[in-house]
Image: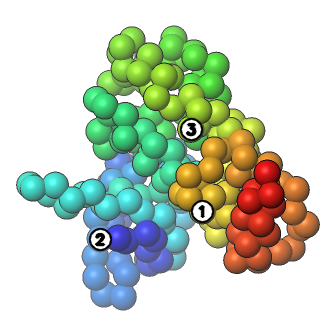
């Protein structure tokens, strides 16, 4: 799995980014919101990625924050939502606002996204309410790539903890801890409950 790429921006043609990493060119499809945060062509950038392998294609999606990538991964697990619709969701709403819309069951806000009809919006709410409910409480929408606290929350989510549990466990820990210490202390704390 390709989890991130650090390289030089060759060309930006939304929704496509061409990135050169040590002489190898990668074509990534990204949400439009990521292009607003990105440096200009010729500059170095870190892009978090998700690779989808199908019979007819290998698709590499890029995101400026871990929160965007994690939200994308949740979205594509919902029946009827593929990569293009998930990117449209993230182009229209930040992970924080999307999580809030899902948590509140705001079908009207969700159907305003291209490719999301009323039935799909209701399916999003039903299937992701518990999984995304805590995203609106996290500062993930304004993530700084490489933030150990946000990466620790993402690691706990990957281990199956709910967003609220993960964010509360990390929030209760002292500032200045590294990623490994944050995860270790949070797991110790969560195992006591």
Q: Quadrant of residue 101?
A: top right
Residue under label 3: 131
Q: Please name the colour scheme applied to the rendered image.
A: rainbow
- In this view of the protein, can residue 86 be seen by the observer? no
The residue under the point 45% across, 71% down is 4
* Residue placed most toward the observer, 133 or 52: 133
| Residues at discs 2 and 1 in contact (Cβ within 8 Å) | no
* Residue placed most toward the observer, 187 or 41: 187
Q: Position of residue 129 (x, y in %)?
A: 56, 28
Name the disc covering residue 26, or none.
2
Q: Eyeballing the image, is 166 above or below 121? A: below
Residue under label 1: 155
Q: CA distance from mark 2 to mark 1?
A: 26 Å
Horizontal placement of 170 versus 41: left or right? right
Horizontal placement of 138 versus 122: left or right? right
Q: CA distance from mark 2 to mark 3?
A: 31 Å
Q: CA distance from mark 3 to mark 1?
A: 14 Å
The residue under the point 48% across, 66% down is 47
Q: Position of residue 159 (x, y in %)?
A: 56, 58
């Amino acid at each position: 799995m390709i989890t991130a790429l650090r390289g030089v921006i060759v060309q930006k043609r939304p929704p496509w980014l061409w990135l050169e990493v040590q002489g190898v060119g990668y074509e990534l499809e990204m949400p439009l919101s990521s292009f607003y945060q990105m440096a200009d062509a010729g500059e170095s950038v870190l892009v978090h990625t998700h690779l989808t392998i199908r019979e007819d294609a290998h698709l590499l999606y890029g995101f400026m924050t871990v929160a965007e990538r994690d939200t994308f991964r949740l979205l594509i697990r919902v029946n009827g939502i593929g990569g293009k619709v998930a990117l449209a969701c993230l182009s229209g709403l930040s992970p924080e606002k999307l999580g809030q819309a899902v948590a509140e069951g705001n079908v009207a806000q969700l159907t305003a996204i291209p490719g999301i009809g009323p039935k799909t919006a209701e399916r999003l709410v039903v299937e992701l309410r518990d999984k995304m409910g805590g995203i609106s409480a996290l500062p993930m929408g304004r993530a700084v790539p490489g933030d150990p606290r946000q990466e620790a929350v993402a690691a706990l989510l990957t281990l199956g903890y709910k967003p609220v549990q993960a964010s509360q466990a990390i929030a209760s820990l002292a500032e200045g801890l590294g990623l490994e210490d944050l995860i270790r202390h949070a797991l110790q704390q969560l195992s006591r409950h």
